[in-house]
Amino acid sequence: NDSEETTVQQDSLNAQEQENSQPLVTDNYTADPSAHVFNGKIYIYPSHDWDSGIPEDDMGSHFNMKDYHVYSMDSVGGEVQDHGVVLDVEDVEWAKRQMWAPDAAEKDGTYYLYFPAKNEDDIFKIGVATADNPAGPFTPQPEPIENSFSIDPAVFADSDGEYYMYFGGIWGGQLQRWQSGNYVEEDKYPADSAAALQPKVAKMSDDMMGFAEAPRDIKILDKEGNELTTGDNERRFFEAAWVHKMNGKYYFSYSTGDTHKIVYATGDSPYGPFTYQGVVLEPVLGWTNHHSIVEYNGKWYLFYHDSSLSGGKTYLRSVKMTELQINEDGSIETVNAMVE
Ligand code: FUB
């Protein structure tokens, strides 16, 4: 009968929700999960949080990460394997501190790890390291990618064989310091009514070690075709860019930072413009929100983090995953993953 069916459905939903709220890794703090399917397995490239004792500030100095681990899973719900430290800041000639959100890509059997870090002048740049398998270890290049700046690289492999890097983040991510094209150590933003600072995109060179072009601005528009403004904190770009393609459409998703949401916008080209559509993930426990969206065996998954494992410490986060519901019209059903 109907009520029994509803109870059974409700039970399985609760079980699913409970599973979703479990950290994938419990013996390390992990954040900013960039997930990819390589050779039929799910690989996760997260930041590796730890307590370095640096006090919290608006520039994110307390996110003082110094290495990366890679994790993999044979199936959704399967055991999560830790492949150990795959890159250490000590081994990167140009990088001094704060190894923030990384991403990875594969081309012709080589795996590329892209990562932001501050150089000796405390300026964020983006580096690249290579490996012959997705679990590393990765060998870094001695210099950061030419013309790279700011944080949160996300490399998208398009279906035509081209690769694009999306990047940028305001506040601690320093995007606001590059408005003139050169680095200026001043944190000024456009007026609230002016167009918000734009994330960047650049096509990757054939060897994946650099940009094939100067980084371009990405326009994010409202449904009337107007650019989102600086004062539109509920929707404007802050950090954590990610791109996936679904049914021929490009989905550009990102964090709104000080309003703590993951939102998305869609477009017809990897360069945008992208039109704002809605919220993917409501705020989670902890200040930051950062995600990736990946298709695995015909289903779409959201990888994200929160601070539940550390009892709410913003700089000690844990990676989680949940299935995404995609509606008939291609819109994404909003996820609420807040745990008390
Ligand atoms: O993990 C350090 C920084 O916090 C990331 O680069 C941002 O996206 C935010 O999650």
Image: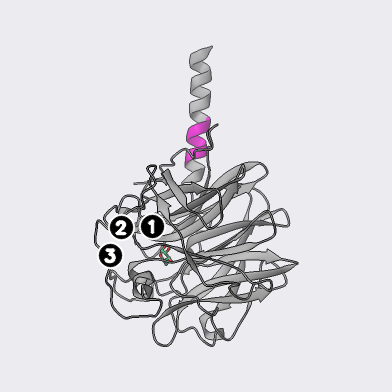
Give the amino acid type for the residue marked by disc 1 in the picture. Answer: Phe
The magenta region covers 12-17
Which disc number belongs to residue 190? 3
Do callouts 3 and 1 mark residues in contact (Cβ within 8 Å)? no
Q: Secondary structure at mark 2?
A: helix
Task: Tell me the crowding category of disc 3: few under 14, some 14 to 19, or many 20 or more residues within 10 angstroms, Cα based.
Answer: some
Q: Quadrant of residue 209?
A: bottom right
Provide residue 2's location: percent of width, then percent of height. Answer: 51, 13
Q: Residues within 10 Å of mark 2 (few under 14, many from 20)?
A: some
To which residue does mark 2 refer?
Answer: 258
Q: Choose between 110 and 330: the one closer to the eye.
A: 330
- Residue farthest along the right direction in this orientation: 108
- The mark nearer the N terminus, 3 or 1, is 3
Residue at disc 2, CB closer than 8 Å to ligand 1: no
Mark closer to the observer (3, 2) = 3
**Category of crowding for the residue at label 1, using alpha-carbon neighbours closer than 10 angstroms: few (below 14), some (14–19), many (at least 20):** many
* Residue at the disc numbered 1: 237
User: Can you tell me which quadrant of the image ligand 1 is in?
Assistant: bottom left
Counting from the top left corner in percent of width and height, residue 155 is at 58, 63
Q: Is residue 302 left or right of residue 80?
A: left
Viewer can see residue 130: yes
Secondary structure under the numbered disc 1 in the rendered image: loop
Q: CA distance from mark 2 to mark 1?
A: 10 Å
Residue at coordinates 49% horizontally, 83% vertically from top-left?
95
Q: Earlier in the sequence, mark 2 or mark 1?
A: 1
Q: CA distance from mark 3 to mark 2?
A: 16 Å
Q: Residue at x 38, y 57 (%)?
A: 237
Q: Nearer the viewer, residue 220 or 157?
A: 220
Q: Position of residue 38 (x, y in %)?
A: 69, 58
| Magenta span includes 264 | no
